[in-house]
Amino acid sequence: MLQFAVCDDEPQMAQEIAALLATYLKEHRAEPYAIRQFRDGAALLASGFAPDLAFLDIRMPGMDGLETARQLRQNGSRALLVFVTVLGECVFDAFEVQAFDFLLKPPDPSRFRRMMARAMAALGPGDSLVVQRGNACRVVGFSELAYCEVQGRKIFLHLCDGSLVDYYGRMDALEKRLDSRFFRCHRSYLVNLDCVRGCGDGQAALAQGGSVPVSRLREGDFSRALLRRMRERGH
């Protein structure tokens, strides 16, 4: 069950956001969900509620939205954080806590729906990735993704059309976000099995040209995973 928190010291604003959220979820989400409202950050943290998506008012008495976000991250929360702001408030500090998006008061329903569509894609389960770079987001469909490569602290997503999307992240975390069509063929590579057209000599040949390395220790598992995927697709 997905859990949503709305944290705002203005009851009317909290209710408005919660109503927009409930309307969207009823229209687009069949699975159960929970929405809880909190008057401030301290109340949210003290509740033990673990949201998947939290709307945090930046300016609240006592513990404001930014400090609440820092505490959530320090507690290990990986929730998507949407900061609720008024025009002119400084939001640059929000990037240090990996803000997903910003919502201006009063919330625009169309803007809210677009933000929620990206949030639902990020929360999954689904067939796409949401990649965030600074204050911009990019949705990448699994079918668009040929293979993933890590170099240092940076992930490179190689798309089937030859384009490239990069961001800072960890391969282990990315692997958990992908579905069974992807295989970790090398410690630095994840490949879309639907894009593989053959394998041998430590390489997996790709339909769009080129190849990716296959670790010697993973060759057997890779071959079995490829055959299993082909059977699933009816090949």
Image: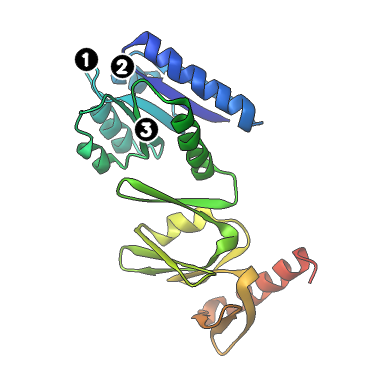
Please, is residue 100 above or below residue 46 in the view? below
64 vs 6, left or right, is left
Q: Look at the numbered discs 2 and 3 and tell me whether their residues touch, using CB distance below 8 Å.
A: no
- Quadrant in the picture for residue 93: top left
- Circle 3 packing at 10 Å, graded few (<14), some (14-19), many (20+), is many
Q: Position of residue 49 (x, y in %)?
A: 43, 24
Q: Which residue is mark 1?
A: 61
Residue drawn at 63 percent across, 28 percent down: 27
Q: Are marks 2 and 1 in contact (CB under 8 Å)?
A: yes
**At numbered mark 3, what does the secondary structure look like: helix, strand or loop?**
strand
Q: Is residue 99 above or below residue 31?
A: below
Q: Position of residue 223 (x, y in %)?
A: 65, 77
Percent x, y of residue 10: 33, 11
| Residue 124 falls in image quadrant | top right
The span from disc 2 to disc 3 (Cα, nearest Å) is 15 Å
Residue, disc 2:
40
Quarter of the picture holding the C terminus = bottom right
